[in-house]
Amino acid sequence: MRRTNLRSFTTLALAALAPLAANAQATTVEGTFGAWSLYENEDAGSKLCFVAATPSEKKPATANRGPSLLYVSAWPKDGIRSEVSVKLGYPVKADSTVTVTIGTDTFSLFPKDERAFVADATQELKLVEALKKGSKADVTATSARGTETTDTYTLSGLTQALTELGKQCK
């Protein structure tokens, strides 16, 4: 597996990974698996690892927004092994729900600013299993301006990326 410094990635990737940008030199790409990349960041002895992908399709294509990503993160120090979150690229409408649909399964996430998270740990485990089994995931949300968006993520390579996440982020 080739290890690449994050600085060699595009401006888009840096903008999408804004929470880590302050410490970009410590963030490395540990591998790419289909549409998914595995990242690792270690800062002051605290390790964060995550797999992330960008949407293969964004609707409406004309919506004015920043980068969007689907993440599965792990913080070994805190005992977190697979936290699902979405970066939508715009402020989400207050008191709305973000949905992730995989096949016939739909999961509800709660929004906070430009991101969305699963509120219930049991649902999060079910979502991760559905992501592993599915071929695509549709993330639907409504912006603070009232625009409904749907981002489609291919799940090709996710299972392998999550396997590597589990091995490397202990």
Image (cartoon, helix red, strand yellow):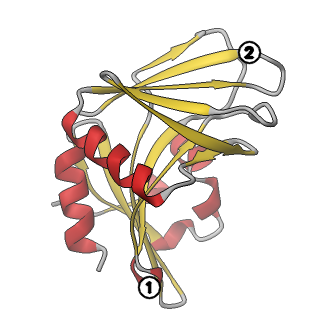
Q: Camera-side residue: 45 or 95? A: 95
Q: Does residue 22 sit above or below 114 in this rendering?
A: below
Q: Which residue is mark 1?
A: 77
- State the image coordinates of residue 109 (x, y, percent, origin top left): 57, 41
Amino acid of disc 1: Lys
User: Is residue 9 among what the camera can see?
Assistant: no
State the quadrant of the N terminus: bottom left
Please tell me which residue is depicted at 31% across the width and 74% down the height of the picture.
169
Amino acid of disc 2: Thr
Q: Residues within 10 Å of mark 1 (few under 14, many from 20)?
A: few
Q: Are marks 2 and 1 in contact (CB under 8 Å)?
A: no
Label 2 sits on a secondary structure element that is: loop
- State the image coordinates of residue 115 (x, y, percent, origin top left): 64, 45
Left or right position of 27 against 157:
right
Label 1 sits on a secondary structure element that is: helix
Q: N-terminal of the two: label 2 or label 1?
A: 1
User: Is residue 125 among what the camera can see?
Assistant: yes
Q: Which residue is mark 2?
A: 147
